[in-house]
Amino acid sequence: MTAPARVLVVGASASGLSTVESLRRKGYAGEVVVLGGEPHAPYDRPPLSKQVLSGAWEPTRTALRTQEAMSALEADIVLGDPAVALDPVTQTVWTASGREVQADAIVIATGLRPRTLPEQEGLTGVHVLRTLDDALVLRRALSAGARVVVVGEGVLGAEITATVRMLGLDVTMTGPQPAPMALQVGPLVSAALAELHHERGVRLRLGDGVVGLAAEGTRVTGVRLGAGEVLPADVVVVAIGASPATEWLAGSGLRLDNGVVCDSRCRAAEGVYAVGDVARWHHEGLGRLVRLENRTNVTMQAAAVAGVILGADEPYVPVPYFWTDQFDAKLQVHGFLPVDADVEVVEGDVSARRFVARYRSGGVITGVLGWNMPKQARLRSAEIVDAPALL
């Protein structure tokens, strides 16, 4: 297979950067063009809800690479000019400014857009957290004495809640699930997380969905719950998940269904690939489509896609991994944690908040979670290597 003369990466994100770096590491010497919708060079998102939001880091610390390292990639990187259309037949992408870029291989790495509440449009005091700019705007809004309500009890909502509370602010977490990260880690660990947040002074109003926002004029004043309660708020953070950023691909002919749908090689069409949060590909081990939203997948999938572009013919079959930090709890998750899995603590003690839990589904080990035991969890993850084929 002849290497493409030009590769176009749409998205100057961690996934886009990882794709370029993987191509160069694998010896690709052709032309590379990167189109980024944001004005910033590639930066890391996990610190946004923690170090950046708390003020411990200045924005420059989130940069994934130095200017020297970026220059060494010898890529034409265009920032602040988002892609608006793609023709996979001619392999051409158009941008908001009217730029037209044709390539022999195109990698879609446009990530996610945060979901919002219908009423938040035009209201001041309501925030989302996806980009570096989002984090800085929210950080400025967290003034002394502010009452904060976080709508969403998933990973991002729980991290934001912990950060805000550590700043000394009054914070309430709300959402339809009974405990933080209940859908991600199951009842045993989510109950422990609820206890941790409660002990640290977080107000938990969980198990009741949000039905709307209260406002005076254009200023938010609270969050309305389904049972009728109104949680007073000066600042509301909406963390109810995100959707793949595929709007710009409407009319392209690509299959768009909760992401860019791809084969097991992450190929969406001939010469067109997807990587990172936006990619939904056929996982041969699981026998179904999978889309992962975690930082580790970005690096692994980018390497796999770069290999396919350069002639490799191997399916992408990862065992997922993600982590989260909340207060002094550091959780590492390997594999898949079905909500109905049987959970067994195999090392440590939940009450001591230092343990490893093993998840079984259908009689096989599908995942491992470590709470402040990263090394032990990593070692235990070897037990789940064969599990995906049985799920």
Image (cartoon, helix red, strand yellow):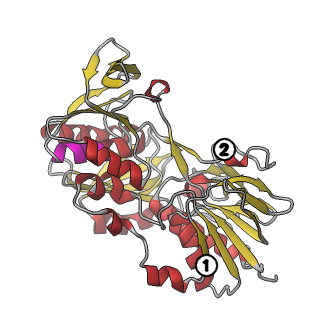
Residue 188 screen position, x and y as percent: 30, 41
User: Which residue is at 64% across, 88% downward?
Assistant: 27
User: Left of 158 or right of it: where is 81?
Assistant: right
Identify the mark at residue 247; answer none if there is no mark: 2
Instruction: Confirm whether the magenta stretch covers residue 163.
Output: yes
User: Left of 248 or right of it: where is 326?
Assistant: left
- Say which of 368 and 202 sits in front: 202
Name, please, the residue furthest toward the front: 97
Q: What's the amino acid at mark 2?
A: Glu
Residue 189 visible in rendering: no
Q: Main secondary structure of the magenta part?
A: helix
User: Where, by quadrant of the figure, is residue 332 drawn?
Assistant: bottom left
In the structure shown, which secondary structural element does the residue marked by tag 1 occupy?
A: loop
- Above or below — where is 172 with respect to 266? above
User: Left of 183 or right of it: where is 78?
Assistant: right
Q: Which residue is mark 1?
A: 75
In the structure shown, which secondary structural element does the residue marked by tag 2 occupy?
A: helix
User: Where, by quadrant of the figure, is residue 7 drawn?
Assistant: bottom right
Residue 384 screen position, x and y as percent: 47, 61
Q: What's the amino acid at mark 1?
A: Ala
Residue stretch rendered in magenta on the structure: 159-166
Instruction: Confirm whether the magenta stretch covers residue 179.
Output: no
Residue 152 screen position, x and y as percent: 37, 35
- Above or below — where is 117 with respect to 187? above
